Each structure stands twice: as C-alpha cells, then as structure tokens.
Image (spheres, rainbow, N blue to C red):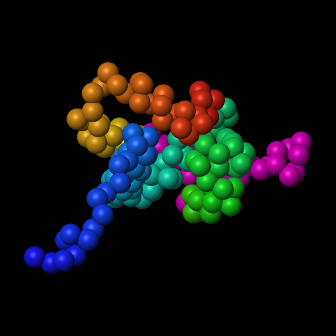
C-alpha cells in the first residue's frame, strides 16, 4: 500500500448552496455542449446564437439595444458585438440606428433570422426534453423561478 493513501485529508463538507451551484454549473455545461452540437449540425448556429435570436424575436419590434441584449445573455457589450458580427454577415440580424439618437444602435432579427429560429426551436425543444426526461415535470416551474432569481431575470428580460 502507498503511504500517500493515508496522507490525504478527508474531503471538506460542502454546503447545500455550494452543492447546488456546482451541479448547476455542470448541468449548464452539459446543456450548452449538447445544444451547441445539435444546433450547429442542423442549423450552423451555436446555442449562444440561438439565445440571441430568441431574445431579439421576443423583443418589441424584433430589436434590442446591444446593451440590453448583453444583459439578457450575461455578456459584455463587446461580447455581444463579437457574437452579432457573424450573424450580421449571414443575414440573420441587422444593425439599426435610432433615428432620434445616432449614438443608439439596435440589433434586429431579420426575416431570415426568424425563419431559422423557427426551425431551430423545434430542435432545441427536442434536445431540452431529452435532457430533462428524468426531471419531475411538476418541479419545472419552481426550478425555473429559482434559476430566474439567480440570474436576476423577470418577465421583461427572460
């Protein structure tokens, strides 16, 4: 037997809140990895691209200021700009200037973006159901509310 087997300290106890945070992070990584794989294979977009299109589609007029889009995605404004560039190049989103204030720019979903999103939603729904198949359906609302509280989300920014 190796002496190192006896020299290791016992693992520290983990609080329920830390355990939840660790499991949440792992679940999020699993979800994103799977959705990236499938959405990329079928539609050529990442899950981050899908979320961006989703938020734009839900916004009034199909457009949001970049700073609002960044807040919804948990990114910086420059991170959103980097994400938007390839989507603009392939015609899924477009830039729109505010006619009253040239300093304000919007990201807007295009008709092509709406069509792709409509098709991608079907795939994302299927993968989400597959990943959540073992979770009790009667707990979805409570879990969704808890996750919304963690993320600082409400009805206007979900």
* Residue 6, quarter of picture: bottom left
- Identify the magenta region: 89-118
Please name whichever residue, 9 or 16, is drawn nearer the observer in this view of the structure.
9
Residue sitting at 53 percent across and 41 percent down? 54
Is 3 one of the magenta-colored residues? no
One can see residue 44 in this view: yes
Residue sitting at 60 percent across and 29 percent down? 154
Residue sitting at 48 percent across and 35 percent down? 147
Q: How many marks?
A: 0
**Residue 24 vs residue 66: left or right?**
left
One can see residue 43 in this view: no
Give x and y (percent) for residue 136: 27, 27
**Residue 22 vs residue 62: left or right?**
left
Give x and y (percent) for residue 44: 42, 59
**Residue 149 vs residue 79: left or right?**
left
Residue found at the far bottom of this picture: 2
Is 91 one of the magenta-colored residues? yes
Say if 110 sits above or below 83 in the image: above
Residue found at the far top of this picture: 138
- Image quarter hosting the N terminus: bottom left
Give x and y (percent) for residue 152: 60, 36
Please name whichever residue, 29 or 52, is drawn nearer the observer in this view of the structure.
29
Give x and y (percent) for residue 16: 39, 39
């Amino acid at each position: 037997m190796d002496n190192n087997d006896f020299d290791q300290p016992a693992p520290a106890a983990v609080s329920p809140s830390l355990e939840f945070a660790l499991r949440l992070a792992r679940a999020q990584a699993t979800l994103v990895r799977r959705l990236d794989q499938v959405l990329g294979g079928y539609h050529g977009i990442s899950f981050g691209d899908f979320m961006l299109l989703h938020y734009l589609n839900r916004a009034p007029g199909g457009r949001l200021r970049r700073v609002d889009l960044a807040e919804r995605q948990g990114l910086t404004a420059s991170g959103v700009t980097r994400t938007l560039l390839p989507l603009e190049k392939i015609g899924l989103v477009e830039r729109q200037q505010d006619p009253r204030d040239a300093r304000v720019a919007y990201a807007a979903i295009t008709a092509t973006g709406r069509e792709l999103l409509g098709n991608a939603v079907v795939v994302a729904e299927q993968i989400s159901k597959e990943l959540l198949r073992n979770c009790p359906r009667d707990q979805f609302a409570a879990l969704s509310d808890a996750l919304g509280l963690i993320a600082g989300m409400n009805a206007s920014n979900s």
